[in-house]
Amino acid sequence: MQIKFYGVRGSIPTPGVETQRYGGNTPCILVTSQSGQQLILDAGTGIRSLGEELLSGTEELVLLLSHNHWDHIQGFPFFAPAYQAGRLIRIIPGKTQAEDNEAILKQMSGEFFPVASQQLASHIRITAMAADQWQLGDFAIRRCRLNHPGSGSAYHISADGQTLAYVTDNELFPPEQTTTSRTQWLEFVAGVDLLIHDGQYLETDMPYKLGWGHSLISQAVDLATDAGVKQLVIFSHDPARTDQQLDLLAQQFSGHSPEVLLAKEGMELWC
């Protein structure tokens, strides 16, 4: 599988000179199998540039959402294929509650956006998955509930004999009731070739941000180490974190096993 990052920032877009190298767009990742099938993970502002690249095709697009918080859906109204006549776009929500399934389209209303979702030229189909595992073309997908306010889903994706786990907006040690325990996370990500995990906070952010639904970078690294993950990508960078600060954090894990990378816009990996 090829994995390309189009948005890596958590909470809110952060354009500016201090975030140019790592990027200021909110979450969006494109996963491509060896046969060319594609899977889009989340629809933050990073999906805008991805959409420009996808306009030349006519194949069905599949968008897999982790949850409905704004930074994960706010780019969809600017996703060019949604305005492409006849283009089929399938959206799989991150939550199972029926009242939440169309949140990505409900944001396109007169109160929030000038173009209503009913005006889009594409054919949009929202497919809520009742089961926690399914096959989607080349991709075998399992999901697990996030520890995050409002809930949501993490995904274990297998294709071409390789495995990827996408676990963003997840608090490994929440102060209140735990939806998924660390033991369960160890089982969910055990031995994956690539783990993309939330690492928005540092120890200095606590206890003020305890319960906000994100993990410490050190906690994500410990999880990857204990689970025998082959490569870890720290994702959902804090909006206040500058390029220079992220460079310093990356240096701390130089030579670490497993390999630890900090996500950057435009970064491409194979697993």
Image (tube, rainbow, N blue to C red):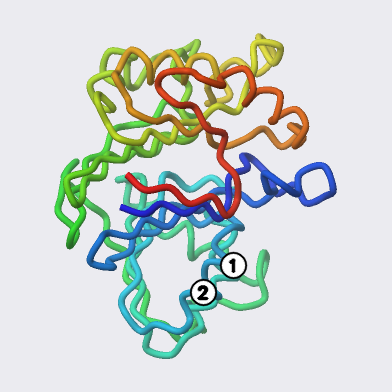
- In the picture as drawn, the residue positioned furthest to the front comes out as 255
The reply to whether callout 2 and callout 1 are in contact (CB within 8 Å) is yes
| In-front residue for pair 148/2 | 2
Q: Crowdedness of circle 1 by 10 Å Cα count: few (<14), some, many (20+)? A: some
Query: Residue drawn 41% across and 51% down?
Result: 3
Circle on res. 53 = 2
**Whole-number angstrom distance, CA of label 2 to CA of label 1:** 7 Å
Query: Residue drawn 38% across and 60% down?
Result: 63
Residue 45 location, x and y as percent?
61, 58
Report which quarter residue 87 is drawn in: bottom left
| In-front residue for pair 261/41 | 261
- In the picture as drawn, the residue positioned furthest to the right comes out as 17
Q: Amino acid at mark 1?
A: Ser
Q: Secondary structure at mark 2?
A: helix
- In the picture as drawn, the residue positioned furthest to the bottom comes out as 85
Q: Secondary structure at mark 1?
A: helix
Q: Is residue 7 left or right of residue 149?
A: right
Q: Is residue 86 left or right of residue 246?
A: left
Residue 34 location, x and y as percent?
25, 61
| In-front residue for pair 62/128 | 62
Q: Crowdedness of circle 2 by 10 Å Cα count: few (<14), some, many (20+)? A: few
Task: Give the quadrant of the C terminus.
Answer: top left
60 relative to 181, above or below: below
Query: Residue drawn 31% across and 79% down?
Result: 59
Q: Amino acid at mark 2?
A: Glu
Residue at which label 1 appears: 49
Residue 241 location, x and y as percent?
74, 32
187 relative to 28, above or below: above
Residue 28 location, x and y as percent?
51, 53
